[in-house]
């Protein structure tokens, strides 16, 4: 890998290298969409939608899929056999689900362990989570997951081809917000704004 294929800043280069390792593990080129569900199978993770969880009370299910549906995206826990279980919110769209699953996969690949049990925790992005990782672990899992979904080299190439954040999001099957996060943390936002948003 050439240095110019990595974003500026040591922290972001490290996140990118880990993300590219995940893509290599999944055998997906940087310019192609990564399916986190396939990666989860490679990682031996059990992935369920809340709809598939048996034994949940009707009241709890109705609450989690009704009034609280926008307050959580997913969560992970360890099973007695050592495997990891990831439960996803079925009310969220494919783009958000891909990002959520990728973040949970990254917690596992990065060796993160919850630092304490927590029933309800809001992260910096306003999401309610059923587990609590250290803030640095949360940042790393989200950053590596986002880089895995939208690699820097492809992002930079698409930007120089004149693609919009919406075009790039559709290509990688993620949200426009995730693409714009990647543009900002990789220091491509200024170029993107100049090309697409004009002077302010």
Image (spheres, rainbow, N blue to C red):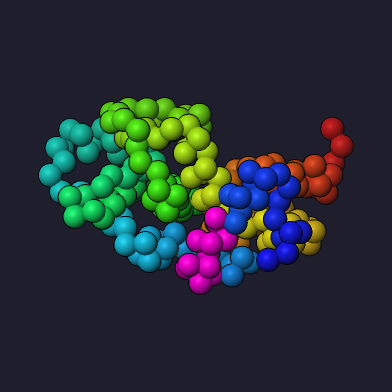
| 63 shown above or below 33 | above
Q: Quadrant of residue 30?
A: bottom right
Q: Looking at the picture, how far across and down is residue 12, in whole percent?
A: 64, 46
Outermost residue on the right side: it is 199
Point out the image quarter for the N terminus: bottom right
Point out the image quarter for the C terminus: top right
Count of numbered marks: 0
20 within the magenta span: yes
Magenta-highlighted stretch: main secondary structure? helix
Describe residue 133's horizontal placement relative to residue 47 as left or right.
Answer: right
Describe residue 191's horizontal placement relative to residue 74 as left or right.
Answer: right
Residue at image location 37% in from the left, 62% down from the top: 43
Q: Looking at the picture, how far across and down is residue 157, in whole percent?
A: 74, 61
| 103 shown above or below 43 | above
Residue at image location 34% in from the left, 47% down from the top: 88
Residue at image location 74% in from the left, 59% down from the top: 3
Q: Looking at the picture, how far across and down is residue 39, in whole percent?
A: 42, 63
Residue 129 seen from this side: no
Residue 111 seen from this side: yes
Residue at image location 38% in from the left, 66% down from the top: 42
The magenta span reads: 18-28
| 104 shown above or below 37 | above
Describe residue 194's horizontal placement relative to residue 187 as left or right.
Answer: right
Q: Quadrant of residue 169?
A: bottom right
Q: Looking at the picture, how far across and down is residue 151, in whole percent?
A: 62, 57
61 within the magenta span: no
């Amino acid at each position: 890998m050439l240095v110019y294929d990595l974003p500026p800043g040591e922290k972001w280069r490290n996140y990118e290298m880990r993300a590219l390792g995940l893509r290599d593990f999944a055998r997906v080129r940087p310019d192609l969409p990564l399916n986190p569900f396939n990666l989860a199978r490679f990682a031996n993770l059990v992935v369920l939608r809340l709809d598939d969880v048996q034994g949940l009370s009707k009241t709890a299910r109705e609450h989690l899929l009704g009034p609280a549906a926008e307050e959580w995206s997913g969560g992970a826990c360890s099973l007695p056999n050592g495997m990891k279980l990831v439960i996803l919110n079925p009310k969220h769209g494919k783009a958000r689900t891909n990002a959520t699953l990728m973040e949970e996969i990254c917690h596992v690949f990065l060796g993160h362990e919850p630092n304490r049990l927590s029933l309800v925790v809001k992260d910096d992005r306003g999401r309610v989570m059923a587990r609590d990782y250290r803030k640095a672990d949360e940042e790393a899992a989200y950053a590596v997951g986002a880089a895995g979904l939208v690699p820097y080299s492809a992002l930079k190439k698409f930007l120089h081809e004149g693609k919009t954040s919406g075009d790039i999001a559709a290509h990688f099957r993620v949200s426009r917000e995730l693409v714009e996060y990647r543009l900002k943390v990789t220091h491509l936002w200024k170029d993107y704004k100049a090309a697409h948003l004009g002077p302010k």
